[in-house]
Image: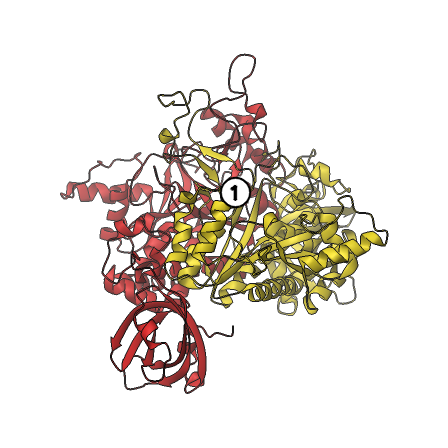
Chain colours: A yellow, B red
């Protein structure tokens, strides 16, 4: 079937004017005006719909089509008439309409406004609504923008493993991956579960981060990035947490913390510009119906320098705000981990733009971050954005074998587990840095949608793994 | 640090001639010739190395550098001298060399040739060898080519879930994802493991395919694709199987089997051309040291039409070969699933090019494939390529609600599990098709590397989840 996408009609309308084309898509609305009828059709190729005009006298199955309901699938051949004087720039005058699949009358995606909570129970259908069609296109375009950004700069894309026997951060609760039947697990002689008989011959989990493995490849390619799913088995039911989410983790050899922040900032601006260029209709819709300041904020971020402030100075700013009467749920003092309320105060109230907070106390950051000369802080940089809080967590990595070994021992970690990681410091170590971007948080930021469940095609959260 | 990538030197050598540049990378070899010394440096930005010349009289730390061993990390500032009369087009005359990280003498990646089996025990270091640096760059470039191919054609990238409560094909062994401790599982009143208390409130597994969920989005966007990890808990130890591998799964509304084959063929050709254009040095190396016919074969595939033959005709071809004396381990007759030996005979001996085999017996294919009018076969198309066998499995999907329901019942499957899938046929169904490409098999095909363990950064197979 030689069909034309509606996106092509809009992109090249002059070429298609007065031409006969075949389109295929789904009914957004149907009106029967006696002698004439109108079908609004969407084929998913762009945000915009196509208006189709049916003439009762000329269309053989007018009655059949006019009786259809929203959601039905049609193949329509007709002539494209340019209509420069009307709100829509053209319409299709139908010659033939093939009813490919009628929607049954109990179709849950009716034209009326539905709550996002209800739509979460209809994940297999919700991408047919304006909101979710826009969200998932922006998600796709942003994902491609990320690949383009890194590939244009010579970064090598590395698929770090999903199933892993190590815990990347010693943080995050992990999901076990197993073929052992818990109703009847194999046991060792002393009565413990014998993971030696599990599929991989040991305990394995779903990865919480690909960073440590990405470093393996940064030490040969120089610049690499991952972009894949990561997991947390945390029993938290917030708008910002999911059990399964996608992360982008670049890792750069011969790069320090300043360089890492530069790349983070360039990447965010690149993705924002790319989405503004490729999804203008979607952003208009979000700006109108989801988040009225969205476009202005994205424009602002794309064109202004991000703020950079040390953790120590950030704490002073927060303490000053506290002293001046600002109420935080969690009181601020040097040494605490910043909470979302603190992060949002810094980026929304104080700096009013994306803000890197650098050089955090070492005790609240991961073992692999490079220790600063003050003995108290590490070369970390979290990027905070208005409305979200932390969107990127980055750091320079500890490249000094002796310092890293000492830190691993200090924290009581199992040094044997990190043999490979330490090998990178034994054989041609170099200063290097990297960051992790939570992809869903970026999509939330780009769309103004404030619940992570609404930017994941089929979200996985505590108690939810449907579809 | 303002450093120049070696790839940039090769791309713009005329601009850099006689200029002072700083490069950073790892030592591939060092020769001390008394008054002069040579360092061959690679920074991972391209396959080629940089020759660095050191003058004992001019370089302050000549002795220190000359004593270094392979794998050490250096930052070198010097003047680029064009050398059009020598094998390499330029060399860097070092002014200063900073020893960033020396390699300890027990560095396992010495210059001598090492077996791939040994290198599999050194996965954190093996990408520093020529072979693996080439493999993983081709992998990255091919992945990007796939994204480009689909994005240029308006396909929407969908991240289908990794953790799933359903079994996409009723095929493939699955890994359980759980937070239940098998040493002490919660039990129901009748003594069974109570998965209601597991993280998601039910049994969940790692996905074997994102197809069914991709169809959800094809019914709103028209054209979509997935590109993500999939899993099989199969106890098979072959060169072609891994427990964790990446799949590309496009799904296209208003598309039939012919259209599906067209897109498959265009995609393969696009990726081959893109890799030939962007990785010429890597392909030269594979062609020289891994697979002598590689470049000719890729060129041939990129420029010739793929063969298309029905399963029924393919079986006749194989039976004729059998009758003519060709020995197959598994005898051929209508109804059998084709084995790799049969697939390879068809594509290597008979057609001598990539070959689609279409319309397989329904009993050896999945429930969702569209039934042909003969009542015996389904609209499936497997794409076979020389040296590998099946690389793509595609089909037109059964879009008729009644036919699909009947098939699910016939096979004794649980209809309730497929409610969402059947909903797509209730609400605006349309003919549609899609395919699955095993990404590692594609990388094997592009590189000539014949073991899947050598095209995965950190392969997961039975008993192996290291690194």
Q: Position of residue B210 (x, y in %)?
A: 50, 42
Q: Residue furthest top?
A: B190
What chain does badge 1 belong to? Answer: A
Q: Position of residue B327 (x, y in %)?
A: 16, 41
Q: Between residues A64 and B250, which one lies in front from this camera angle?
A: B250
Q: Is residue A323 left or right of residue B4?
A: right
Residue beneath the point at 66% across and 48% down: A337
Q: Is residue B342 above or below residue B204?
A: below
Number of marks drawn: 1
Residue beneath the point at 82% across and 47% down: A327
Q: Can residue B263 be seen here?
A: no
Q: Between residues B182 and A405, which one lies in front from this camera angle?
A: A405
Q: Residue furthest right?
A: A325
Q: Position of residue B156 (x, y in %)?
A: 57, 53
Q: Position of residue A233 (x, y in %)?
A: 57, 36
Q: Is residue A413 above or below residue B407?
A: below
Q: Is residue A400 left or right of residue A313?
A: left
Q: Between residues B301 and A405, which one lies in front from this camera angle?
A: A405
**Image quadrant occupied by the C terminus of chain A:** top right
Q: Is residue B70 above or below residue B320?
A: below
Q: Residues within 10 Å of mark 1 (few under 14, many from 20)?
A: few
Q: Residue furthest left?
A: B325
Tell me the SS state at disc 1: loop
Q: Can residue B328 be seen here?
A: yes
Q: Is residue A27 left or right of residue A164?
A: right
Reading the image, the residue beneath label 1 is A170
């Amino acid at each position: 079937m030689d069909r034309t996408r509606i996106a092509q009609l809009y992109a090249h309308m002059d070429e298609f004017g007065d031409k006969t084309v075949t389109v295929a898509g789904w009914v957004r609305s149907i009106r029967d005006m006696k002698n004439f009828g109108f079908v609004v059709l969407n084929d998913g190729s762009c945000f915009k719909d196509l208006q189709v005009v049916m003439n009762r006298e000329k269309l053989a199955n007018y009655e059949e089509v006019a009786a259809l309901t929203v959601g039905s699938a049609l193949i329509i051949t007709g002539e494209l008439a340019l209509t420069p004087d009307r709100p829509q720039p053209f319409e299709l005058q139908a010659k033939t309409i093939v009813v490919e699949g009628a929607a049954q009358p109990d179709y849950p995606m009716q034209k009326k406004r539905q709550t996002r909570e209800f739509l979460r129970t209809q994940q297999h259908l919700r991408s047919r609504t304006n909101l979710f069609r826009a969200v998932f296109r922006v998600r796709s375009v942003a994902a491609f923008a990320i690949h383009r950004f890194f590939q244009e700069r010579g970064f090598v894309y590395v698929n770090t493993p999903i199933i892993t026997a190590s815990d990347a951060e010693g943080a995050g609760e992990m999901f076990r991956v197993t073929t052992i039947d818990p109703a009847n697990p194999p046991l060792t002689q002393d009565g413990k579960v014998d993971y030696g008989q599990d599929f991989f011959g040991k305990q394995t989990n779903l990865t919480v981060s690909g960073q440590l493995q990405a470093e393996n490849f940064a030490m040969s390619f120089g610049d690499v990035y991952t972009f894949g799913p990561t997991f947390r088995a945390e029993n938290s039911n917030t708008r910002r947490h999911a059990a399964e989410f996608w992360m982008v983790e670049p890792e750069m050899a011969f790069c320090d913390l300043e360089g890492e922040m530069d790349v983070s900032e360039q990447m965010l601006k690149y993705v924002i510009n790319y989405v503004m260029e490729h999804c203008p209709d979607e952003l208009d819709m979000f700006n109108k119906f989801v988040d009225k300041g969205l476009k202005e904020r994205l424009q602002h971020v794309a064109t202004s320098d991000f703020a950079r402030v040390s953790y120590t100075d950030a704490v002073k700013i927060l303490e000053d705000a506290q002293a001046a009467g600002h109420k935080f749920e969690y009181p601020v003092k040097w040494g605490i981990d910043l909470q979302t309320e603190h992060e949002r105060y810094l980026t929304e109230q104080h700096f009013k733009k994306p803000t890197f907070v650098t050089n955090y106390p070492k005790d609240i950051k991961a073992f692999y971050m490079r220790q600063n000369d003050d003995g108290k802080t590490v070369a970390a940089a979290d990027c905070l954005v208005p409305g979200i809080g932390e969107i990127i967590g980055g750091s320079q990595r500890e490249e000094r074998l002796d310092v890293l070994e000492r830190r691993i021992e200090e924290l009581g970690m199992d040094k044997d587990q990190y043999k490979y990681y330490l090998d990178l410091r034994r054989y041609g170590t170099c200063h290097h840095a990297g960051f992790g971007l939570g992809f869903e948080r970026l999509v939330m930021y780009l769309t103004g949608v404030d619940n992570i469940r609404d930017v994941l095609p089929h979200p996985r959260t505590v108690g939810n793994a449907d579809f």
